[in-house]
Amino acid sequence: MRKVKIMLVAVICLVAGSLSAQVSFDGCGRLIEDVEGSACVFFTPDWGGTYVLNDYGDFGPGDYVHVTGTINWFDAVWCGTFQLVVLEVHGISECPPCCVNLTGNIDGDPDDMVDIADVTQLISFLFMSGPHPQCKAEANVDGGPPDIIDIGDLTALIDFLFVTNTQPAACPDGGSDPTWGIVDHTGCKGFEGGESAVDTTLDMDCIEYAYDGKSVLSIKHINAGFNCCPVIAAHIDFEGNTIIIEELDSLFNGGCACLCLFDVDYEIGNLPPREYRIIVIEPYRYMNDPVLDFTVDLSSSPSGIHCVERTQYPWGYYE
């Protein structure tokens, strides 16, 4: 009887062992080439480890890919001097960056909200053997070494939410680079009577702004001075937390012998919510007139207007 029990236990352990030998995989990582020159392409998931894929489709070394599949711990191959476990691929596709703008969305909230739930998940991961954050980059809240998620990140997250409101670190490489464009403009106010969106007079030079709370900043330059017959043009540079809008008087057929005021609408994308200095360089500002130059914290003041007074032509000319 004792022998039967022992055999039964042995069979159960063997079955359990065979079941646990295969685990599902669903995550992102980088394909890297074997430096020793074998034909293997290694796959390094975000949360560590190195595997050999049985199929990597049209992708190659350097690509950041999303893989679903099965890891069989008893299935290994030799790659040069390394013996690595095979990850049997069920699906492989490009993996877009999971962290955009600022870090802190550790629980993967679809609206990119950072709140107490993120603190709870990070505590669970660090101290209670909880699940990995869905996006490792989001958990690097203190901006330290990207492969190390530790108490410093938890401290930075708590500090942001409950103490000093200091912004979390930016995502790797600052997320995507900011984008910008001119989306609309009025006609010459002297000829067509263009109207501002707010109550301003023609001796005011203003920037009105509105931020969507995530990444898009809309800017309206009210009473921008250009030639009467321009092709409205500009260039926007980003130097750290400074946004420089340089407006260009690109003339059509040599322009006209007059100046006008226009309202010009810009849109800037991929802009994290933090403090920025906005400077507007205008082609017809008189040397001693004030520059449109102000600082705004988009995380606490998502909309507003900043104006300076001008009395030189073309400002105030049609009143």
Image: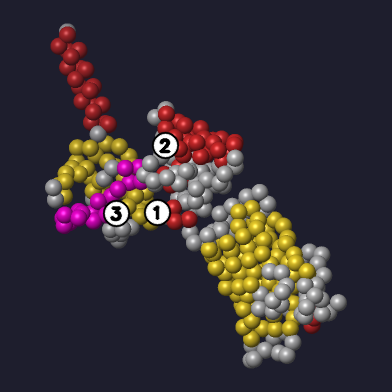
Element under label 3? strand
Can you name the residue that lies furthest to the right here?
A: 319
- Which residue is located at x 33 percent, y 46 percent? 45
Q: CA distance from mark 3 to mark 1?
A: 12 Å
Locate residue 50: give its quadrant: top left
Q: What residue appears at the point 19 percent right and 20 percent down from the top-left corner?
A: 10
**Residue 31: which disc?**
3
Q: Residue 136: x and y, percent?
A: 42, 44
Instruction: Judge whether residue 42 is colored magenta.
Output: yes
What distance separates the C-alpha of mark 2 from that of mark 1? 25 Å
Q: Does the segment drawn in magenta span residue 10?
A: no
Amino acid under disc 3: Leu
| SS label for mark 2 | loop
Labels 2 and 1: the sequence-earlier one: 1
Q: Are marks 2 and 3 in contact (CB under 8 Å)?
A: no
User: What range of the chain is rendered magenta?
Assistant: 31-48
Mark 2 / mark 3, whichever is N-terminal: 3
Q: Which residue is mark 2?
A: 150
Name the residue carrying label 1: 95
Q: Residue at x 64, y 91 (%)?
A: 254
Nearest to viewer (mark 2 / mark 3): 2
